[in-house]
Image (cartoon, rainbow, N blue to C red):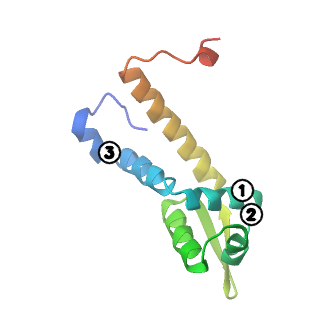
Amino acid sequence: MSDPESTTGCCRAKDPEVQRLADLFRALSHPARLGILEELARRPDACCGDIVDCLPLAQSTVSQHLQMLKETGLITCEVRGRTCRYSLDLAAVAGDLAAAAALLARLASLAGASAPASEKD
């Protein structure tokens, strides 16, 4: 992330990394998308039909959620013949986890919160 001290207040909202995190949190804000991500963690290389079999959602609904997750970069799609195979993008997930943790730590620091006991040891 860019230097958090270089921008302050509303100006920080225009930072591309802040926008990326907003997009990430938006993608994670729907229970169905979280369920799809969990299913892809259990079953990499799944097609839409595989996910529909595990979730109480219509195929069209799952397809729409998969599209958003793909646009956000959390999953990849490989076209094989007439089917698309979806997998978690593990590198993107790891990077997003680190960026989200840094943001939350920064917010806690700005608010004056102390580190959790587990981090003090």
Q: In this view, does 66 lie to the left or right of 121?
A: left
In the structure shown, which secondary structural element does the residue marked by tag 3 occupy?
loop
Residue at horizontal 47 percent and vertical 52 percent from the top: 24
- Residue 61: x and y in percent read 54, 74
CA neighbours of label 1 inside 10 A, class few (<14), some (14 to 19), many (20+)? some
Q: Label for residue 44?
A: 2
Depth check: 120 or 2 in front?
A: 120
Picture layout, residue 78 above or below residue 21: below
Q: Is residue 84 above or below residue 21?
A: below
Cα–Cα span, label 2 and label 1: 6 Å
Q: Residue at x 51, y 73 (%)?
A: 64
Quickly name the residue at label 1: 41
Q: Do the residues labelled 2 and 1 touch (CB within 8 Å)?
A: yes
Q: Nearer the viewer, residue 23 or 1?
A: 23
Residue at the disc numbered 3: 15
Mark 3 to mark 2 CA distance (whole Å): 33 Å
Give coordinates of residue 28: x percent, y percent: 52, 53
Task: Look at the numbered disc 2 and give the secondary structure of its residue.
Answer: loop
Quick one: quadrant of the N terminus? top left
Q: Which of 74 and 42 is in front in this view?
A: 42
Dot 1 lies on which element? helix
Residue type for callout 3: Asp
Outermost residue toward the top? 121
Q: Looking at the rendering, which quadrant does residue 7 occupy?
A: top left
The amino acid sitting under disc 1 is Ala
Q: How far apart are marks 3 and 1 (CA)?
A: 30 Å
Compared with 29, 5 (above or below) is above
Disc 2: CA contacts within 10 A as few (<14), some (14-19) or many (>=20) = some
Q: As shown in the figure, which amino acid type bears the numbered disc 2?
A: Pro
Which of the image's four quarters has the C terminus? top right
> As drawn, is 68 to the left or to the right of 48?
left
Q: Position of residue 16 (x, y in %)?
A: 36, 49
